[in-house]
Amino acid sequence: MTLNIGRFDRIIRVVLGAFLIIAPLTGGISLYQSTLLAIISAVVGVVLIATAAFRFCPLYRMIGIRTCKV
């Protein structure tokens, strides 16, 4: 598994992932009144945080993107 996520990309993924996990729990956004949307948001948030933790994104690999330094 080759690393393909850089520092800035990791920071954005963690912040956005945390938001997508926490937002449905607080109930402040009317979009999350649907349980299905809240679950999808949480799953996407977990995926973003996991890809940031492992510094590897399968989608980036498929399309040939690499944001980390060699």
Image (cartoon, rainbow, N blue to C red):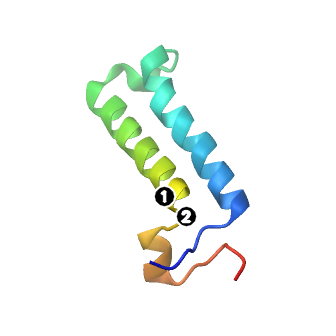
Of all residues, the one furthest to the top in this rendering is 27
Decide: few, some or many residues near mark 1? Use Cα within 10 Å; few <14, some 14-19, many ≥20.
some
- Residue 11 against residue 54 in the figure, above or below: above
Q: Residue drawn at (66%, 73%), measured in percent from left and top?
A: 67
Residue 53, image x, y percentages: 53, 54
- Image-based side of 23 in relation to 68, left or right: left
Mark 2 and mark 1: span between their CA atoms? Answer: 6 Å
Q: Is mark 1 on a helix, strand or loop?
A: helix
Q: Is mark 2 on a helix, strand or loop?
A: loop
Q: Nearer the viewer, residue 55 or 44?
A: 55
Per the image, the residue denoted by label 1 is 51
Per the image, the residue denoted by label 2 is 55
Quarter in which the N terminus is drawn: bottom left
Which disc number belongs to residue 29?
none
* Contact flag, marks 2 and 1 (Cβ < 8 Å): yes
User: How many callouts does the rendering have?
Assistant: 2
Residue 64, image x, y percentages: 53, 84
Q: In which quarter of the image is residue 10?
A: bottom right
Residue 38, image x, y percentages: 35, 30
Residue 57, image x, y percentages: 47, 67
Q: Quadrant of residue 15?
A: top right
Quarter in which the C terminus is drawn: bottom right
- Residue 58 against residue 52 in the figure, above or below: below
Decide: few, some or many residues near mark 2? Use Cα within 10 Å; few <14, some 14-19, many ≥20.
some
Q: Residue drawn at (44%, 71%), measured in percent from left and top?
A: 59
- Residue 3 against residue 27 in the figure, above or below: below
Q: Indicate the amino acid at tag 1.
A: Thr
Q: Nearer the viewer, residue 59 or 29?
A: 59
Q: Indicate the amino acid at tag 2.
A: Arg
Q: Residue drawn at (50%, 74%), measured in percent from left and top?
A: 60
